[in-house]
Image (tube, grey):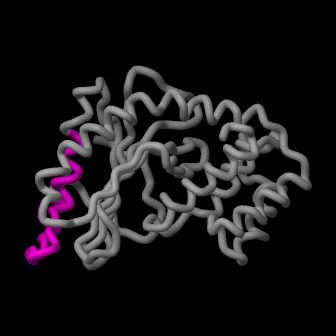
């Protein structure tokens, strides 16, 4: 199907078929890797049970094939003109991180990705993963189905929340302290906020600032979920959502 999702940089695009041909390392007594394709298929199989379907997808692999990051754009009966709903999926064959999935959004005007921390699965590759993963994924997809209402409410609050210049500077430093951005990205965030490259983000709101951060954070997909989850926590606190 046509793919409207972009994985930015840090991985090579692959199709579902190519993903299925990636070899899986042999297991050990304490470590049980699972095929990248298996976790993707488990998620896809769970979606129809909760009236969700895939409308677009993108899958990326590191050059050695050891790390997989996939994005599924999801339809569930409602839509928004400026952002779409996505599920992020990841798996590793090098013990770098556990198998997992997380709720997210993609802003259409700039293709920025962000991931929320409320709904997620993170399962280490222990010998029981093959048994446990289908149940964990089904439970997570069920909660994702319910969680998007809360995510819509969050974005609406961000849009309503006006930002003064001192508040922007303060939140940017808090983002540095919390590991959302590094020191070299502080000037980039401020420059992007002051002169946004997308007309939709000119209103001086928390939503504009949030998208400023995600514009600057485009890059390493392995780090993006954790960083944008921390960013959501900061913005939620600033908007009085915590």
Q: What's the magenta region? A: 19-44
| Quarter of the figure with residue 158 | top right
Residue 115 in sight: yes
Is residue 9 shown above or below 94?
above
| Residue drawn at the location 22% of the way across and 36% of the way down | 46
- Quadrant in which the N terminus is drawn: top left
The x and y percentages for residue 80 are 54, 28
The x and y percentages for residue 20 are 14, 59
Relative side of 198 to 37, left or right: right
| Quarter of the figure with residue 199 | top right
Is residue 46 shown above or below 91?
above
Looking at this view, is 229 or 18 the one in front? 229
The x and y percentages for residue 225 are 48, 58
| Quarter of the figure with residue 19 | bottom left
| Residue drawn at the location 21% of the way across and 66% of the way down | 125
Residue 199 in sight: no
Looking at this view, is 152 or 196 the one in front? 152
Q: Residue pushed farthest top? A: 77
Relative side of 133 to 12, left or right: left
The x and y percentages for residue 3 are 36, 46
Relative side of 71 to 158, left or right: left
| Residue drawn at the location 74% of the way across and 67% of the way down | 188
Magenta-drawn stretch contains 138: no
Magenta-drawn stretch contains 30: yes
């Amino acid at each position: 199907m046509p793919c409207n999702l972009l994985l930015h940089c840090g991985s090579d695009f692959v199709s579902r078929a190519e993903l299925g041909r990636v070899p899986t390392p042999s297991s050990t007594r304490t470590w049980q890797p699972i095929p990248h394709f298996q976790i993707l298929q488990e998620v896809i199989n769970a979606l129809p049970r909760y009236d969700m379907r895939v409308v677009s997808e993108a899958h990326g692999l590191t050059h050695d094939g050891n790390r997989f990051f996939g994005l599924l754009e999801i339809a569930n009966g409602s839509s928004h003109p400026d952002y779409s709903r996505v599920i992020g999926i990841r798996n590793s064959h090098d013990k770098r991180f556990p198998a997992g999935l997380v709720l997210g959004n993609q802003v259409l005007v700039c293709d920025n990705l962000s991931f929320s921390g409320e709904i997620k699965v993170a399962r280490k590759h222990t010998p029981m993963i093959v048994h446990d993963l289908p149940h964990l994924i089904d439970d997570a997809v069920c909660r994702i189905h319910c969680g998007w209402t809360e995510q819509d409410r969050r974005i609406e609050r961000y849009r309503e929340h006006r930002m003064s210049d001192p508040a922007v500077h303060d939140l940017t430093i808090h983002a540095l302290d919390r590991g959302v951005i590094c020191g070299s990205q502080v000037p980039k965030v401020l420059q992007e906020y002051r002169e946004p490259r997308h007309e939709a983000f000119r209103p001086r709101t928390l939503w504009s600032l949030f998208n400023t951060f995600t514009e600057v954070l485009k890059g390493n997909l392995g780090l993006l979920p954790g960083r944008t989850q921390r960013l959501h926590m900061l913005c939620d606190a600033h908007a009085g959502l915590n």
